[in-house]
Amino acid sequence: MTEDLNTILERLDEQGLIDLLTEAVEQYSPSFAEEPAMEVFAARLRESGISYLRQPVAEAGAPVGDHRANLIIELGPQPSSLMWVGHVDTVPIIDEEEQRTHREGDILHGLGTADMKSGCAAIVAAVVAIAQSGIELKRGLTVALVVGEEEYGDGSEALLETRSAPLTVIGEPTDLLACVDHYGYYECRLMARGTRAHAALPEIGASAIHAMLEWMRHILEAGGETYFAQGLSVNTREIRGGAGLFMVAEQCEAVIDIHAPPTVPIDMINQFMHETRAKAVATHPGCELEYENLYWAPGYNNAPEEPLLGPLHRAFDVAGLQWHPVAFRSHSDGNLFYQKGSVPVICGPGRLEVAHTRAEHVSLQQTLQAARLYTAMIYEACVR
């Protein structure tokens, strides 16, 4: 470890980081209502004398205003060599009592702890330590806390209209593994239409619900055994339909999510949907089945020998972590940065397994470790 990096690391305020994370988690900030949590991070930056700017992000159909905005920090000579991105929004709360913020030893419980206010708190702590150390950056750094990731990434889209960097780190929960590859994400609506009949005479009708269940069975059974991939992660998000009392259901709809390995294109998934539909139609000829792709974010692979990954590899070594790159199996804003020509790496504290659950939590020690890792990343990419 160099003297300069050690000087920066000595400035990390561990208790201040824990307090910052706790306060941020206590602020309920679902998508389109992110400002309470964003203000917590902004206040810490103001207290530390670090300048930042707010980039307005308009809601769909609404004029641009300052009520909803990304928070952007720029240090060193611009344009930046490294961009760090994290989102402050969360999914909606499930149960206020179960998801209340509380601490049990090293574990902080609460909505947004893992996904991903711990990553945001860690990077803010790292930036404060760098600023207070007096070490000058030789290459530029951009840190962006964005809105809207849990919807469709409008905060990152707005960010990319004006800023980019060759290398991007996104602090989604990965248990501090470096995810250099990324799964694709496919969101789809299934529609079934049958023939209404009296419930006592189902044989003269055609149940849209029965046809939908058959289609879903083929999708779920075939999803893990596809001929074009090692397996798709298929989730039935919702299913609804019916025709009221004493009737055979005439309509049924479902929404599914598919996370596909990085090399799987949308054409293959559409073909998969077409083939499973044909199997369901064969056993339910009296029903019409259709599907509509609602959203597609393609996956990507970064070459293992990509030279831009060098600073991150060195940072892992300095932080005492092993560099074992893997693929990120969820959806994130990473594909947006990849499409803009950046090399995105997903890496943050917390585990994906607890994100979006009633039991969401994060290790405070791992959050502190993330702050040290992010500090090392900035040093290797922007100072060394």
Image: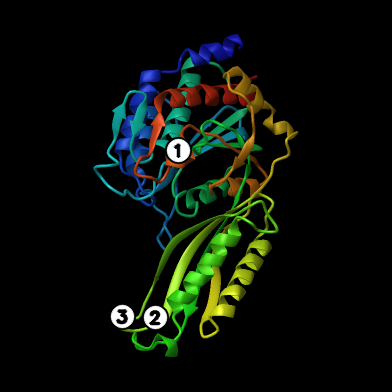
**Which residue is most to the right?**
305
Q: Is residue 205 left or right of residue 35?
A: right
Decide if residue 87 is in sight here.
no
Taking the spot 68% from the left edge, 45% from the top edge, the residue there is: 341
Q: Which residue is mark 3?
A: 244
Q: CA distance from mark 2 to mark 3?
A: 8 Å
User: Callout 3, which amino acid?
Assistant: Gly
Which residue was labeled with disc 1? 53
Q: Residues within 10 Å of mark 3 (few under 14, many from 20)?
A: few
Under circle 3, the secondary element is: loop
Residue depicted at x 60% and y 30% = 140
Query: Amino acid under label 2?
Result: Ala
Real-space Cα separation, disc 1 to disc 3, in angstroms: 54 Å
Labels 2 & 1 near each other (Cβ < 8 A): no
129 above or below 26?
A: above
- Relative depth, front residue between 293 and 139: 293
Q: Of circles 2 and 1, which is in front?
A: 2
Seen in the image, is 368 located left or right of residue 40?
right
Residue 192 x, y percent position in the rendering: 48, 77
Give amino acid for label 1. Leu
Q: Which residue is mark 2?
A: 249
Question: Where does residue 85 sit, x and y in percent of width and height?
Answer: 52, 38
Q: Are marks 2 and 3 in contact (CB under 8 Å)?
A: no
